[in-house]
Image (cartoon, grey):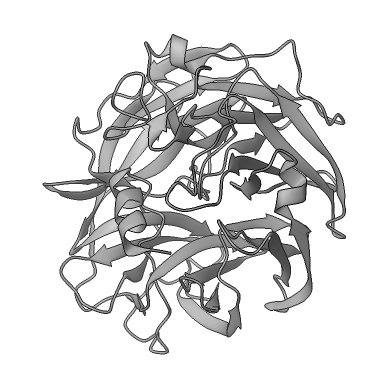
Amino acid sequence: MKKSYLKWFFAMGMGLFLGACSSDDDTATPAPEPGTGGQGRYVVASTPVGSQGVADYLLTTSDLTQGTISTVGQGIEQDGSYRYYLTHKGKFFSLLYGQGNPGAVTTYALDEKGGLVKTSDFQSETVQVFTPAGDDILTIKVPRSGNESASWFRINADQSQIVSEGQVNIVKLAGNGERAHFTWATQVGDKIFAPYMSIKGVAPDAFGTANPDSSWIAVFSYPSMTLEKVIKDNRTSFIGSYFNNGLAVDENGDVYGFSPASATNSGVTTSTKPSAFVRIKKGTTEFDKSYFFNVQEKSGGYKIANQTYLGGGKFLLYMFGTVNTATGAKKLAIVDAYNQTFTWVTGVPDAIASSSASYNNNTISDDKKSIFVGVNTDAGSWVYTVDIATAVAKQGLKVEGGVITAIVKVK
């Protein structure tokens, strides 16, 4: 991936690329409190300020609501370029983005004291999509130009190794002269729903499109990854965005997907449809035409940047800060997708430089009443506790010496 694009992507506030490769020295992590292993630990990934050759340190804590932790002399070093994190089956996975080269997949588990211990480290292809599915982590390498096939890999979470792989012709999948660029993938029952953007795939406008006002989801059987069909709609633009999970499955088995309405052509936004949520009912593979949640209208003209599902039909939304555009420093909101209500989060700083990644935030409190969000400002970095019912945030744990990029709970 080109450095210039990554700098732009971080400026957009995604904060997804600021991780890196794992060091063999795991001794620098802070000593966990005795007896916390069974309840799980929070892993806070923090990018040290001003360090060369070090992207993230993994810090662990049992409490995000108070206190201070620091990258100075502490944490498990993640050296390399960029890393992404997720948990599955009681393990913490750190995936290296190798910028076209193979990247390490490093696996950690918690010891009896709640400390992170490396259990595996192997090489895989650089990927843009990664998600838990069954006993696996499903990853997809999606070329933006050149090669017409996306490659998928099933990494068994217990074995920490690739157990199956295959390819999908993304030009044939798009079927419109462009190419399908998967934004993410989500397991829905015995299927994988993979939304995609339609992109030109040709420089200098590889991510531009002549099809700005349509949504597509490729439906694959799992674990065979056999393509079954493509779900299509034209009430909003593509679902999710580059490195941005646009889908969530609620407790009823219904699937909700959002569009940022941010499609461009030659650098100019060309989406004419609003930023909104659509729905696919449980057991179906068609968009529910009776449901359309126009978030852009309810918010006063703001577009959705990304989301974290909270339960009970509620989402934490990261909203673009400039009205009617997919630009601007992020603002936080909570929506109820069932009742189609929108509420801005109060108690957070007005100027959020960046925040913890939303793509894998499993940082909801154990009582399901609040969610933890890492917020970075010019004044420093803190974890904020956002009360889901009231949409009021409270400042908690301070992270010194670095910028928070992810907060993940490992059980």
Question: 214 or 289, which is in the foreground?
Answer: 214
Which quadrant of the structure image shows residue 161?
bottom right
Question: 404 or 75, which is in the foreground?
Answer: 404
Give the residue at x 71% y 52%: 170
Give the residue at x 37% y 33%: 386
Q: Position of residue 298 (x, y in %)?
A: 45, 10
Give the residue at x 38% y 47%: 14
Q: Position of residue 106 (x, y in %)?
A: 53, 77
In screen coordinates, is 60 left or right of 52? right
In screen coordinates, is 228 left or right of 167? right
Give above or below for 375 relative to 299.
Answer: below
Which quadrant of the structure image shows residue 348?
top left
Residue 223 can be seen, yes or no:
yes
Question: 320 or 203, which is in the foreground?
Answer: 203
Give above or below for 334 relative to 410.
Answer: above
Give above or below for 254 relative to 72.
Answer: above
